[in-house]
Amino acid sequence: MSEINLENLAEQVTRRLSEVLEVESLESITERVNLLEAEATQDNLWEDRDHAQRVTTQLSHQRQKLDRLTKLRAQIADLAELVSLADHGELGHAEVLAEINAVEAQLDEIEVELLLSGEYDPRDAIVTIRSGAGGDDATDFAQMLLRMYLRYAERKGWKATVLETSYAEGAGIKSATVEVTGVMVYGELSAESGTHRLVRMSPFNAAGKRQTSFAAVEVVPVIESDDEITIPESEIRVDVFRSSGPGGQSVNTTDSAVRITHIPTGIVVSCQNEKSQLQNKQAAMRVLLSRLLEKKREEDEQKLRELGGNVKASWGEQMRSYVLAPYQMVKDLRTGYEENKPDQVFDGELDGFVAAAIRWRASQKA
C-alpha cells in the first residue's frame, strides 16, 4: 500500500467523522447527558418505574455514545502521525491500514445508528414469529428463527423475555412472542419484519428431498404511558386456559395462561409463560396495545402515501432467503446483502443484515 493511498484513506476517514459530527455533535450529546443526569437524580424518579428505566437506559446509551465518539475523534486525529511514521519506515503500512480499517468499521456502526431517528426507534419491541407453509419444516424453521433472535439479543446485551410459545404437534413451534428491551431495540429489529424463507434438504422427509418452507416475523414497538391508545373493556374478550408445552413447576398445572381478543380488529394475543394469571394478562395487554399502536402507525403512513399518489407494497415481504442446499447462503432480497455461513447467522450474527436493511430503508424514504 503506497503512502498516497494511506494519506487519502486517512483524509477520507477524517471527512466522514466531520459529516457525522455535523449530524450529531459532541456538544449536543453532552447536553443530553446533562439533562438526563439531572432527571435521573430527582427524588421522585422511581415513582414511575417504567419512566425511570427509560431515563436510566437513555442516559447509559448517551454516555456510551459520547465516550465512543470522543475516543474515535482522538484515534482519527492520530492517523496523520501514523501515516508519517509509515512514510519514514518507522511503522509498517499494513499496521496503519489496519488502524484505518478499524476506524472505518466504527464509523460504519455510528452512521447506521444515526439513521435510527424514527419516532419509535428508541423503544423496546415485541417480536412475533409464526410458521407458514411447509409443514414440519416450517415449524422447525420458526423455532430456528426464535433461537436466532434470542442469540442476537444476547450478543447485543438486550433482555429478551419469551411471553408465549405455541408448540407444534410435530417439530418446532407454531408461533412465539418475545419482548425485547434495551437500547434502540425497535429501530434495529424492525428491519427484520417480513417473510423469511428456508431452503434445505428436509430432515422430515424420508426421501431426503429439498424442501422450501416459510415463516413470518412481525416487530412492533412497545407501548408507552404517554401513547394515546385506550381500549374500552367492552372491546376485549379475556379467556384463561392451561399452558401447554414444556414448563416448570406451576406453569402447566393451573389455568394461568391468558388470551385476549380485540373484538373490533380481531387481533388475538396470548401469554402463558408467567406464573400468575395477572402477570400473563398484563403482558398480553402490553402486546395488544403495541400491535394496535403499530396498526395505527401503518394506517397513518398509508394515508400519507395515498395523498402523495405513491402507494407501494410493504417493504418487508419476502425479505430474506436462507439456503442450506444445494449451496449455503443467506441473502436479503431487499438489499442484496449476503453471507455464506448460515450457521453463524442462525447463531445470531445479524449485524451485517440489520445494518444493510437500515441503510436501505433510509434510502427508500429519501
Image (cartoon, helix red, strand yellow):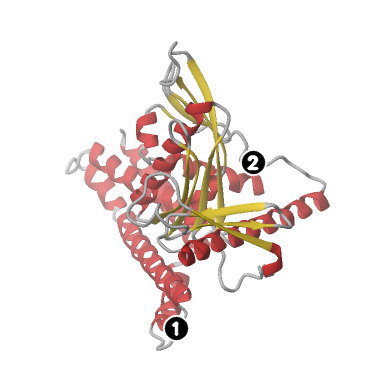
Marks 1 and 2, the one that precedes in the sequence: 1
- Near-viewer residue (242 or 262): 242
Q: Provide the residue designation for mark 1.
A: 47
Q: CA distance from mark 1 to mark 2?
A: 41 Å
Q: Is residue 84 left or right of residue 199?
A: left
Residue extending furthest left?
90
Please provide percent x and percent y for residue 105: 37, 46
Q: Residue at x 48, y 16 (%)?
A: 210
Q: Is residue 239 above or below residue 174?
A: below
Q: Residue at x 34, y 41 (%)?
A: 6
The answer to whether residue 11 is visible is: no
Label 1 or label 2, whichever lies nearer to me, is 1
Q: Helix, strand or loop at disc 1? A: helix
Q: Are marks 1 and 2 in contact (CB under 8 Å)?
A: no
Please provide percent x and percent y for residue 196: 54, 34
Q: Residues within 10 Å of mark 2 (few under 14, many from 20)?
A: few
Q: Amino acid at mark 1?
A: Glu
Please provide percent x and percent y for residue 142: 48, 36
- Near-viewer residue (341 or 131): 131
Please provide percent x and percent y for residue 226: 60, 73
Q: Residue at x 66, y 49 (%)?
A: 365
Can you tell which mark lies on residue 241?
A: none
Q: Residues within 10 Å of mark 1 (few under 14, many from 20)?
A: few
Q: Residue at x 40, y 26 (%)?
A: 340
Residue extending furthest bottom?
43
Q: Quadrant of residue 259?
A: bottom right
The answer to whether residue 160 is visible is: yes
Q: Is residue 297 left or right of residue 251?
A: right
Q: Amino acid at mark 2?
A: Trp
Q: Helix, strand or loop at disc 2? A: loop
Q: Quadrant of residue 202?
A: top left
Can you tell which mark lies on residue 315?
A: 2
